[in-house]
Amino acid sequence: MDDFRPDTPSTLRPETRAIHQPRPDIEGSRSISMPIYQTSGFVFDDPAVMAEAMGRPDGAYVYGRYTNPTVRSLELAVAGLEGGTSAIATGSGMGAINTVLLGLLRPGDHLVAQRSLYGGTAAMLNDLVDRFGIEITYVPENDPAALRAAVRPHTKLVYLETISNPMTLVADLPGMCEAARELGIVSVVDNTFATPLLCRPFEHGADIVVHSTTKYLSGHTDVVGGIAVFAAQDLYEKVWHFAIELGATADPFAAWLTLRGLQTLALRMERHCANAHTLATRLAEHPAVTAVHWPGLASHPSYELANKLLSGCGGVLSFDLAGGRAAGERFMSSVRLALLAPSLGGVETLVLHPASTSHRALSPEELTRSGIGEGTVRVSVGIEHPEDLWADVSQALA
């Protein structure tokens, strides 16, 4: 939109760009904070201008299902952070994922996905198989050769997660995205766990980046949202036309809350990562814990790759308890400071049991393929004082 002045030069670092967000001109001045445009539609004086606006993503604001100034500010802000050209904000993270997958795939197409995925994404992929006859091949997240071997003449997409949910495996984005580009396949990367502060997949060859903005970008467990960011304008426009038909549109108030949270992203991510490091290293030494899954540990299979790709290893970790599901249930019912709740990425520490909650739709075979055990506990580490967190975790383990 030409009413958004480019206040933030592209040379600025992400920590600065997250604070200085795009805002529209209002008769020669601009608000410090982006206003909430709480309206379902916009009035026109010229019928031709209205007709044109309904057919292009960069036209005048026309209807809330298309976009809105507050929503557009969020789209521009996240696209700028990721280094993309354009973005589509949605009503949830799954809304962003579904907008991309349904907007680009057709019945009978084939896609390649990494084995370890968020449970909602895995369930959606299974539904694509059942509903539309989409074929899916699963490969390791760090094996470009396996990706090349899996490709077929009708392969359209490869789907990756920068840091996988919940086993925190790091995808070989340079290798996997390069292979996809050489083969003419669109690469989609879920960057929710890493955020643009820890990794920017476009710099490694990705075509589309998706986020659940519910998580770290908004950061305060008070909003549900998602966003898809595009490296190329033509791919964005193709998906945009489907997005307005699908109607998975972001709400302006949710977009405003996300913009507000985005301004403290850099500070929060620094503390999330530091607290996760403290918990991971201490959990690794606890006799009740058989394994800790956090890519900042030298014992983690993605340790070397994480050091190359990430500027921090994230605020989510998982660990396996020796006593299986019963031990996991005892742990989660014993925490006092940490909260037993879904989602992640907020300032509070949250715990859950993936096999029975976030990944409950997976079969036992799929859980095993993803590395999730009956005794696996996922922790979204908040920004509380690390010693208070450890005191709570250690007493629950006892």
Image (cartoon, rainbow, N blue to C red):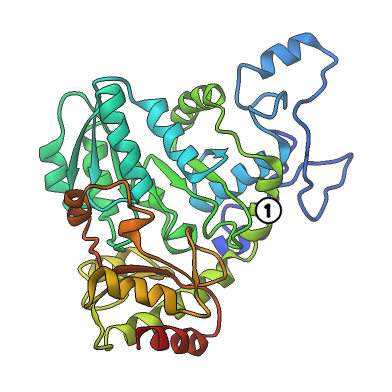
- Give the farthest residue toward the top: 48
Q: Residue at x 17, y 48 (%)?
A: 144
Q: Is residue 358 visible?
A: yes
Which residue is located at x 28 percent, y 72 percent?
326
Task: Locate the C terminus by quadrant.
Answer: bottom left
Left or right of 292 on screen, residue 97: right
Of the pair 53 and 63, the residue shown nearer to us: 63
Q: Name the one closer to the observer, 77 or 247.
A: 247
SS at circle 1: helix
Q: Quadrant of the N terminus?
A: top right
At a point 24% along the width and 88% down the height, the residue shown is 287
Residue 316 x, y percent position in the rendering: 40, 68
The quarter of the displayed image where residue 308 is located: bottom left
Residue 292 can be seen, yes or no? no
Q: Nearer the viewer, residue 310 or 169?
A: 169
Q: Position of residue 129 (x, y in %)?
A: 26, 29
Above or below for 138 versus 260: above
Residue 175 located left or right of residue 253: left
Q: Amino acid at mark 1?
A: Leu
Determine which residue is flagged by label 1: 257
Q: Position of residue 305 (x, y in %)?
A: 25, 65
Whether residue 175 is situated above or below residue 108 in the rendered picture: below
Give the farthest residue toward the right.
27
Above or below, 63 against 351 in this view is above
